[in-house]
Image (spheres, rainbow, N blue to C red):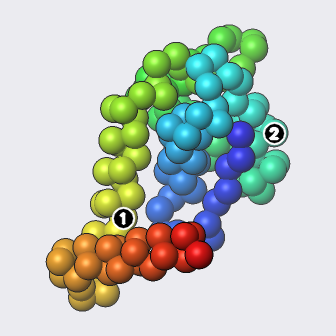
Amino acid sequence: MLISLDPQDTRPIYVQIVDEVRRALVLGTLGADDPLPSVRDLAVKLRVNPNTVSQAYRDLERQGMVYVRRGQGTYASPGQQGGAERRLLADGVAERALHEARRNGLTVEELIEAIRIHDNQRSSEESQ
């Protein structure tokens, strides 16, 4: 499982970790009962405080995304790869896009139009 943080992102680091784990579940790169990196290993890899990773894992556990086996580690919960989790991921992306659009003085309609234009351009590039 690949977790990457964006230093330009205004969201707290633990939220970025939560979102990255959620994304891995939705995309299937993290399957049911797959182990997550240990708190210490992930903290070293991401160069963050272990308490930050612990907070992210606690949030994920409260949300039912992961479970803890005492003395063994943290694992992805079964059944988290479905449509409901995909919807939560989409909601998070939409919320961040709306926040950025409003912060920059754009309307929802302008944002939607920009997304459509970029999607059409990307589709055209992929078909060439």
Image point (42%, 28%), residue name: 82
Image point (51%, 58%), residue name: 12
| Distance between mark 1 and mark 2 Cα atoms | 29 Å
Q: Which mark is residue 32?
A: none
Image point (31%, 87%), residue name: 104
Residue placed most toward the observer, 48 or 89:
89
Specify few, some or many for label 1: CA neighbours under 10 Å numbering under 14, 14-19, or 20 or more.
few
What is the quadrant of the C terminus in the image? bottom right
Expressed as whole percent of the image width and height from the top left, the position of residue 86 reads 40, 40
- Looking at the image, the residue that sits furthest to the front is 128
Residue 8 in sight in this render: no
Q: CB under 8 Å between callouts 1 and 2?
A: no
* Quadrant in the picture for residue 64: top left
Q: Amino acid at mark 2?
A: Asp
Q: Give the residue number, with chain letter if any, for mark 1.
A: 96
Specify few, some or many for label 2: CA neighbours under 10 Å numbering under 14, 14-19, or 20 or more.
few
Q: Give the residue number, with chain letter if any, for mark 2.
A: 41
> Image height check: is 6 above or below 66?
below
